[in-house]
Amino acid sequence: MANGNTPRYGPILAAVAIVVVVLAVVVYLVWQPAPQTTASKTEPAVQRTAQPALNGNTAAIAQTRGLTPDDVAAALKTYVPTGKYDDYIMFSSGGHSGQVMVIGLPSMRLLKVIGVFTPEPWQGWGYGDKGGMAVLASGKVNNKELTWADTHHPALSETQGDYDGQFVFINDKANARLAVIDLRDFETKQIVKNPIAINDHGGSFVTPNTDWVIEGGQYGAPLGWRYAELSDYAESYRGYVTFWKFDRDQGRLLPEASFSMELPPYWQDLCDAGKKVSEGWVFCNSFNTEMSTGGIEEGKPPFEAGASQRDMDYLHVINLKKAAEVAAAGKVETVRGMRVIRLETVVAEGLLFFAPEPKSPHGVDVAPGGEYLVISGKLDPHVTVYSFEKIQAAIAKGATTKDDYGVPILNFDDVVEAQVELGLGPLHTQFDDKGYAYTSLFLDSAVARWTLGGAYQGQHSEPAWSLVTKMPVHYNVGHIVTAEGDTVSPDGTYLVSLNKWSVDRFTSVGPLLPQNFQLIDIAQSGTALQLLYDMPIGIGEPHYAQIIKADKLKPWDVYPDIGWDSHRQAKNPNAPQPGKERIERRGNAVEIWMTSVRSHYTPERVEVKQGDHVTWHITNIERAKDATHGFALPGYNINLSLEPGETTTFEFVADQDGVFSYYCTEFCSALHLEMTGYFLVKPADRAAQTTN
């Protein structure tokens, strides 16, 4: 069916059709049957047949749908055929879903939502499994159970500054918690609650070898959740940054080996760890150096005005290597179990220096070589580039001024390398492999590409420290992420713009609209940027993401052995095994050892008395990939996911009498509906009569 664009795009579409035909011929030649070889362990063995050449129908489809040549090119760049895999994997925060999303690039397919701080039914996370329930319980605040979280900044583990694909960390801004996800099975293994703070923001970020996971604070407050009047803000309120020690072998954060630094009560924001030449140092933003306490209801300036009065706030320059030595030497106080280097000691030991940074910054990003730090002030149209070499020289020279807490303030002109005017509302910066940096512009709804200087000058042809181009995005971009863009060796293939508003990009689903992830091709130099794909995100407001090469991830297809405890990552000697299923009673305690396999549970009948304490073990004895079984026990809020080889345990009191049908929640076979059983709870009065 023709439309009004036919005359305009006819010649172009004809050219596109010719190109597509040529590509089809190339594909046909490349995909001719080859001699049989052993199938790869990491890719499925796909039987390919000769591909027919595409014809002019392709142009007709494009014409009917009103697609431009750029649209067709974008589709070709993002399409991943069935049975083929994405080149990159993006780990994104799930915002107030409390979870982490796993997304393939360039397809932008959602692969998984990892249950972290909040229950997630499909994975059985928070619905009975004893190990998972213990992990969630460790995130309680003052023994109060939390059912939501606000995940912000995922951080992939690194080795020598490159992503290694072993772990990912994520923070909960709302409750100052940190979680560890093991990428062997993409499951959460640990949650720690920061005992000195109620919320955070500057986490999580890792040092180049993942020795430390950084968690920065946000709003000034008395450390340890003490009460203090706002009139005593300057004296009683403080900021903080926590350095969590990570044990890679255990796959756990070690609270007893971790420590915090007390900071002035400015509102610390995002942090980043030094790389290469700046390794051993950490850099954090701050705002509200005015120490505004709000009070709009009393006629005082609201926070948005009171915290934005000064032209400069303070970049926190922290000597982490020396701070760790000070903590190890015992120059700390213990606050609610956390070792804290008090502010007086921080100043006396020379652990902290301030550098003025433009108004209300939101993000500090360290260049791949560690030589430069990029700061964006939300209310300044420039990005400000700091030189680590100049910072070190200024520290050696000695600061001439200090803040009210005695922290040395370095001279702005002594530490700045360059300023580049980009546009309105600059926020976050990422890097590529061509000497370019990319900065999100919230108010402009755009992403700016600009050039680095110094050692990066030879990687591009434009003048150093200059704006190259701006790409409009839709709309109000917050964070951005490039492929491996936080590492010492960025890839520079793709950029994803994490937009806060979608407005008119998708079909309306009511007043609450999804966020919009936009994939941008940044592979070419100069002004050649192409918007490829819009992905609606409707599970929360994501904040930050990191992108890793897919081939760095080595997840298990099935657990290593039958009876695998996924929380300990080891075989459980008490796990049910085939042929050894049983039910044992000891007084009012009943223990069940059950196995699951297509398409039945053994045993299929479990009889207890009302009031019995039930301990139930289940092992999925399958060894086939994707042969997951579920276990649902209605009425008792039990819902489990058992991947091949996995064992789990749950406990409860059989306080409801009646007949309960348990069943498999994963459609595992043709006889899936027959994979069920009866849990019979004999009423207490009848049980007593039977006993008598």
Image (tube, grey):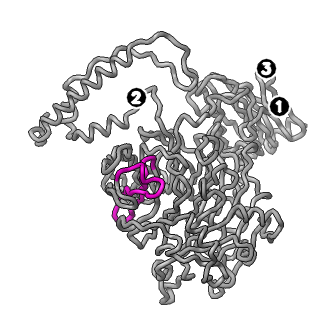
Image quarter of residue 625: top right
Magenta-tinted stretch:
432-461
The answer to whether one can see residue 93 in this image is: no
Q: Does the magenta stretch include residue 460?
A: yes
Say what secondary structure mark 2 lies in: loop
Query: Which amino acid, by three-letter code, is at mark 3?
Result: Gly
Asked if disc 2 and disc 3 are in contact, CB closer than 8 Å, the reply is no
**Amino acid on which the number 2 mark rests in the picture:** Pro
Q: Residues within 10 Å of mark 2 (few under 14, many from 20)?
A: few
**22 to 657, vertically: above or below:** above
Name the residue located 77 percent from the left edge and 36 percent from the top edge. 616
| The N terminus: image quadrant | top left
Q: Nearer the viewer, residue 641 or 222?
A: 222
Residue marked by disc 2: 81
Residue 298 seen = yes
Taking depth in this image into account, of 182 and 363 the one nearest to the observer is 363
Q: Give residue 573's mark.
A: 1
Q: Which of marks 1 and 2 is nearer the N terminus?
A: 2
Q: Is residue 421 magenta?
A: no
Q: What whole-number distance in Å separates the C-alpha atoms at marks 1 and 3?
A: 15 Å
Mark 3 or mark 1, which is nearer the start of the sequence?
1
Q: Which mark is residue 579?
A: 3
Q: Which dot, 1 or 3, sits closer to the camera?
A: 1
At numbered mark 1, what does the secondary structure look like: helix, strand or loop?
Answer: loop
